Image (cartoon, rainbow, N blue to C red):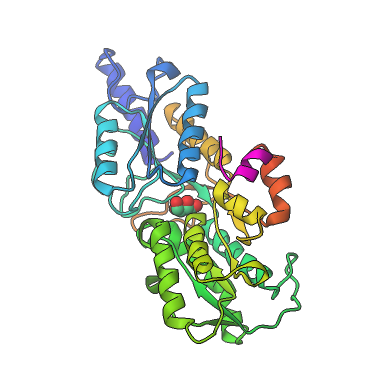
């Protein structure tokens, strides 16, 4: 039985012995008398500038409301103090469980301590919250495998490897550039590690050449995953490393928003048609799915936010009924203080041919949305 369940049981016993049954304070979730309608789940999401987080927020809210729970959903505009404040408010308004996708994975220790003090279980949503003992569960995807899948998609796009993992016809050498996500996001490191472990043998044997020489995560990271910053870095790379007729053949991008910035920089520099570099991505954002359909972006990694939301809801319900949510990984995600029990979902690489079977046939997007590059 984990610490939080014990704490929750402890507080239930205390509440009974005091016969103090008036009102539901913060963290009162789990009392047998509570109906879903009496329970509030605080859902803190990082930003609405990215379509994926809107989809995540909506999915979590809809699924919780369908079960009768109250939902306090907030977006923080990618601003760390705003997210801290919103989480503080959720706690003072009496949330019974918190589901948090952190902007900066290290910035919420104070809020999480307050949550722990009020016996409110905390579920880290897709992004691990670091440096705090008060993270009770983590729902995400296999983030190392995301990085492996992105690098593999780059190799496949270049023809160095085939989709079934066999050696491809193409020999290179190919000029590539690398991008990583925000250094304060734990996932960025997992993605980059998975990608570099996969690419390194090809860099070492000369099949791939990182023309700029920028290969450390610190050199290639993009703060807050910003599209404009990725565009600017790609423009700078084109000016500094591709000014003597050398062409870019491929770009490792860990997220569709960055990919769109990179693509804009490449298009502005005159890249087009069959010579357009292979650009990877992640999240199957609708604007990027259209770019893949149009043959501009090469691939994305699909993480089904419906399934992630479902796991978050399952974990929240477990806490609300004083059970420990079921983990399928209890080793990988050490947040600097402890290993956080996790439920990790699988991911899927999407090339142009996969849009219909994977994204449209599963109802994630309609064919019209893909054609328009816009959801809804
Ligand atoms: C990461 C997440 C990615 C992507 C990125 C930018 O934490 O795992 O899927 O969404 O943030 O939002």
In depth, the one of 244 and 329 nearer the eye is 244
Q: Is residue 275 left or right of residue 320?
A: right
Residue at 66 percent of width and 83 percent of height: 172
Q: Is residue 334 above or below residue 124?
A: below
Tell me what residue is drawn at x 25 percent, y 36 percent. 88
- Specify whether 40 is left or right of 151: left
Q: Considering only vertical position in the picture, is 120 above or below 40?
A: below
Can you tell which quarter of the image residue 147 is in? bottom right
- Whether residue 88 is in magenta: the answer is no
Residue 101 screen position, x and y as percent: 40, 45
Above or below, 201 relative to 5: below
Report x, y in % for residue 62: 50, 27
Quarter holding the C terminus is top right
Q: Residue at x 36, y 56 (%)?
A: 224
Q: Would you say residue 369 sits in the magenta stretch?
A: yes
Residue 302, position in %: x, y? 60, 51
Q: Give how far across and how far down residue 139 sits, in percent.
A: 49, 45
Q: Nearer the viewer, residue 209 or 65?
A: 209
In the picture, the quarter occupied by the N terminus is: top left
Say whether residue 100 is visible. Answer: yes
Q: Is residue 334 visible?
A: no
Task: Judge by depth and name the residue closer to the eye, 237 or 16.
Answer: 237
- Find the magenta span and give its range: 364-376
Question: Where 156 sits versus 364, above or below?
Answer: below
Give the residue at x 57% y 70%.
271
Give the number of callouts.
Answer: 0
């Amino acid at each position: 039985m984990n610490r939080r369940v014990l704490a929750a049981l402890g507080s239930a016993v205390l509440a009974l012995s005091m016969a103090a049954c008036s009102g539901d304070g913060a963290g009162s979730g789990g009392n047998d008398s509570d109906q879903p309608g009496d329970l509030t789940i605080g859902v803190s999401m990082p930003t609405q500038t990215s379509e994926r987080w809107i989809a995540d927020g909506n999915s979590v809210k809809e699924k919780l409301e369908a079960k009768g729970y109250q939902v306090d959903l907030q977006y923080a505009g990618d601003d760390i103090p705003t997210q801290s404040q919103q989480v503080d408010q959720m706690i003072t308004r009496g949330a019974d469980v918190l589901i948090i996708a952190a902007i900066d994975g290290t910035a919420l220790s104070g809020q999480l301590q307050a949550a722990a003090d009020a016996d409110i279980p905390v579920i880290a949503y897709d992004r691990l919250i670091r440096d705090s003992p008060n993270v009770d569960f983590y729902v995400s995807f296999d983030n190392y495998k995301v990085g492996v899948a992105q690098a593999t998609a780059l190799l496949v796009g270049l023809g160095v490897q085939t989709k079934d993992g066999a050696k491809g016809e193409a020999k290179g050498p190919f000029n590539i550039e690398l991008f990583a996500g925000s250094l304060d996001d734990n996932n960025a490191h997992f993605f980059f590690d998975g990608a570099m472990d996969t690419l390194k043998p090809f860099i070492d044997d000369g099949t791939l050449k990182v023309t700029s020489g920028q290969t450390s995560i610190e050199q290639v990271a993009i703060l807050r995953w910003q599209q404009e910053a990725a565009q600017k870095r790609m423009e700078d790379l084109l000016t500094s490393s591709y000014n003597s007729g050398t062409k870019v053949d491929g770009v490792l991008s860990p997220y569709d928003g960055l990919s769109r910035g990179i693509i804009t920089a490449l298009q502005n520099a005159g890249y087009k048609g069959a010579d357009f570099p292979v650009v990877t991505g992640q999240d199957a954002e609708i604007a990027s799915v259209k770019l893949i359909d149009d043959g501009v972006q090469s691939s994305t990694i699909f993480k089904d936010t419906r399934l992630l939301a479902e796991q978050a809801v399952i974990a929240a319900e477990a806490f609300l009924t004083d059970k420990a949510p079921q983990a399928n990984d209890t080793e990988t995600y050490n947040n600097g203080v402890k290993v956080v029990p996790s439920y990790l979902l699988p991911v899927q690489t999407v090339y142009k041919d996969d849009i219909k079977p994977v994204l449209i046939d599963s109802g994630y997007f309609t064919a019209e949305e893909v054609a328009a590059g816009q959801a809804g």
